[in-house]
Image (tube, rainbow, N blue to C red):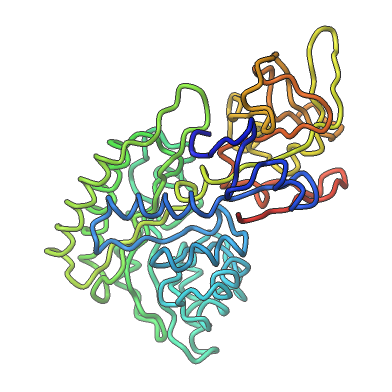
Amino acid sequence: MDRFDISHNELELGGLPLSLLAERVGQTPFYAYDRSLIAARIRAVRQVLPHKVHLHYALKANPMPALVSFVRPLVDGMDVASAGELKLALDAGADPQSIGFAGPGKRDAELRQAVAAGVLLHVESERELRVLAESAQLVGRAARVALRINPDFELRGAGMHMGGGAKPFGIDAEQVPPLLRGMVQDGLVFEGFHIYPGSQNLRGHVIAESLRRSFDLALRLACDAPAPVRHINLGGGWGIPYFPGEQALDLAPVAAMLAQVQSDLEGALPSARLVLELGRYLVGEAGVYVARVMDRKVSRGQVFLVTDGGMHHHLAASGNFGQVIRRNYPVVIGNRLQAAKREVASVVGPLCTPLDLLADRMELAVAQPGDLVVVFQSGAYGATASPQAFLGHPPCLEVLV
């Protein structure tokens, strides 16, 4: 919230007061992403990365086309998880040589598309290797391959575990050496590894430990590689604070470990490049979700602000996207930021379900119909991660300001 300016009691986005921006958009609800905040975050990340480490943007965090086009020249590459995201990255002008394609259930047609495009496939099963070899012959172009590894350790403190234990993602580390030794199919060009233990971690020392262990695993596996390793993607997992009591990620231990790993890489695998894949950390704090209060109701002493937006647009804020215990995102009345009169109220949406809850008994400025509710930390996993067709309500808009 403190990343945004305030003008005359209103939140500002892209230099515009919230009420004026809402008029410019033409409707509520909508998401707004501040390009200056995105650029500032990418610059801040660049300052802590060793200069040889490549920074990729993970489209799944926010695939809005205008945002992808804006981010594209600010990063070194992009990572996608579907043919649809691949099209977005290519349309934005991303270099196919710097696009990675991951995901545990790639369809045969998607694999052929990726081979034709010349992007790097993060292979997650033996089946994918077979299909890629066939696709390379069919398309007449070699398939660029990196193996996605399910490591033999878990990332402590991750919001979501993407590796370690039994997982649908990647190939178990112990299965990789014989697979590498047998990778002799025509049309496959081995380039490296992708290791991504988990996401949404706020503990810098834990991320540093994960980087070390992931890199050491890649070094061990490289002994059986059929060609020199050129690419090691160590994922991301850098979190942002959503809830009271959470602290911003301390990048100092992460930066120190990256410098150490890059130095070790140059000695052990001089032809390889190190890649970090960040999504939420780059765009999450630069976005807000805005809904308009339509009704104010009091039920047995509890105030409910009924808005035109809700869980169908912002599933994560409703607590139904990975939260075990529901907690409130930071929420304000965006056109009454400095109002003296305050109250405890719940913000709900228009859906006929008790799950449609954006704020549960929060202290807010006293609001009336027409006022604008703002949900912060909404730049990632928002519109496209929500069931917008649920109950037939209209979709929300997205703007880059």
Q: In terms of depth relative to the viewer, which is nearer, 371 or 237?
A: 371
Whole-percent x and y of residue 8?
63, 33
When asked about the image quadrant of residue 221, the answer is bottom left
Q: In terms of depth relative to the viewer, which is nearer, 238 or 122?
A: 238
Q: Is residue 223 above or below residue 235?
A: below
Residue furthest to the front: 8
When asked about the image quadrant of residue 376, the answer is top right
Q: Quadrant of the C terminus?
A: bottom right
Task: Tell me which residue sits at (84%, 22%) in the image.
Answer: 296
Whole-percent x and y of residue 138?
55, 89
Would you say 386 lies left or right of 99 here?
right
Number of callouts in the render? 0
Q: In terms of depth relative to the viewer, which is nearer, 106 or 173?
A: 106
Task: Tell me which residue sits at (44%, 26%) in the image.
Answer: 246
Whole-percent x and y of residue 57?
46, 59
Would you say 99 lies left or right of 359 here?
left
Q: Is residue 352 above or below residue 302?
A: below
Would you say 220 lies left or right of 344 here?
left
Task: Tell me which residue sits at (20%, 58%) in the image.
Answer: 262
Would you say 358 lies left or right of 245 here?
right
Residue furthest to the bottom: 140
Residue furthest to the top: 301
Residue furthest to the left: 267
Whole-percent x and y of residue 118?
47, 81
